[in-house]
Amino acid sequence: MTRAELITSLRNIVNELSTDAGAFLSDTGNVLDFLADAAEIVVLDLVEFMPESFLGSEDISLTAGTSEYSLTSDWIQIYCILKNSNSEIPKPIPYLDNVADLYTKTYVGEKADDPECWYLKGRKIVFSPTPSKNSANYASAWIVKPESASMGENGPTMIPRHAHRLIVYMAAILVGTALGANTARFESLYNYRLKKVRDTIGVQVQNNPKFLNNSILDRLYVSSRDRAFYDTDPFFGR
């Protein structure tokens, strides 16, 4: 749906709330504010079960002696960070989710050509050990992106088309709440459509069965050997 279609749909549905609703939404800026807020909420609901629809990537270039890096793109979640190597498969750089365990990965003041792990410090990505040399486009950060803060004329850019009506229903809930009206009917419409979206476009590729994947750390070593008979940990090959 385009921005104009979303505005018209919102006005039509909210006019059922009150005779004052039309005047309340007469200011286009007012309408766009409610729609932008609703779009953010819809993205947060959809990301829970279909983050792949919001994926983007950004390359990170390392600077010698610098461990902290900020992404230029806005992001909700970091899907993974992969090391780029010429003529090689991109390799995941392990994420350290507990900074207290940093002692297992580095010494104080240590530097290395290739960081062993990364962790988050606020919104900054921190590599450890600190990079010892400049490396252009060393890694790619795959991120889950939000909608644009300001909606363009063509409407949402990340939210799939079949989920656009969710923006209208959520905006109606927000407007109704602002007016002190009963929003139960809009909440029912929102939840009904959200379930339909989750059950259909939530799984867009149907040619393969869906299973829970192993932890990314379990996939660091690639081997064709059967795990039932071999242990891929190099410790047992000594």
Image: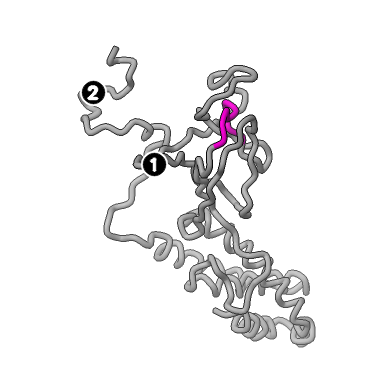
Q: Residue at x 57, y 78 (%)?
A: 154
Q: If the image is split into quadrants, where does the N terminus sit?
A: bottom right
Horizontal side of residue 10 vs 30, given as left or right: left
47 or 237: nearer the viewer: 237
- Quarter of the image where one finds residue 2: bottom right
Residue 15: give x, y in percent of width and height: 69, 85
In the rendered image, which residue does mark 1 sit on? 86
State which quadrant residue 221 falls in: top left
Quarter of the image with the C terminus in it: top left
Residue receiving disc 2: 230
**Residue 58 at x, y percent in the picture:** 54, 51
Q: Residue 131 colored magenta? A: yes
Q: Which residues are magenta?
A: 126-134
Q: Tag 2 or tag 1, which sits nearer the N-term?
A: 1
Q: Look at the image and tell me whether residue 176 can be seen.
A: no
CA gap, disc 1 and disc 2: 30 Å
| 225 versus 41 height, above or below | above
Taking depth in this image into account, of 8 and 73 the one nearest to the observer is 73
**Tags 1 and 2 in contact by the CB under 8 Å rule?**
no
At label 1, counting other C-alpha atoms closer than 10 Å, the crowd grade (few under 14, some 14-19, many 20 or more) is: few
Q: Disc 2 marks which amino acid?
A: Tyr
Q: Which mark is residue 14?
A: none
The three-letter amino acid code for the residue at tag 1 is: Asn
Circle 2 sits in a helix, a strand or a loop, which is it?
Answer: loop
Q: Nearer the viewer, mark 1 or mark 2?
A: 1
In the rendered view, does 217 fall on the left or right side of 43? left
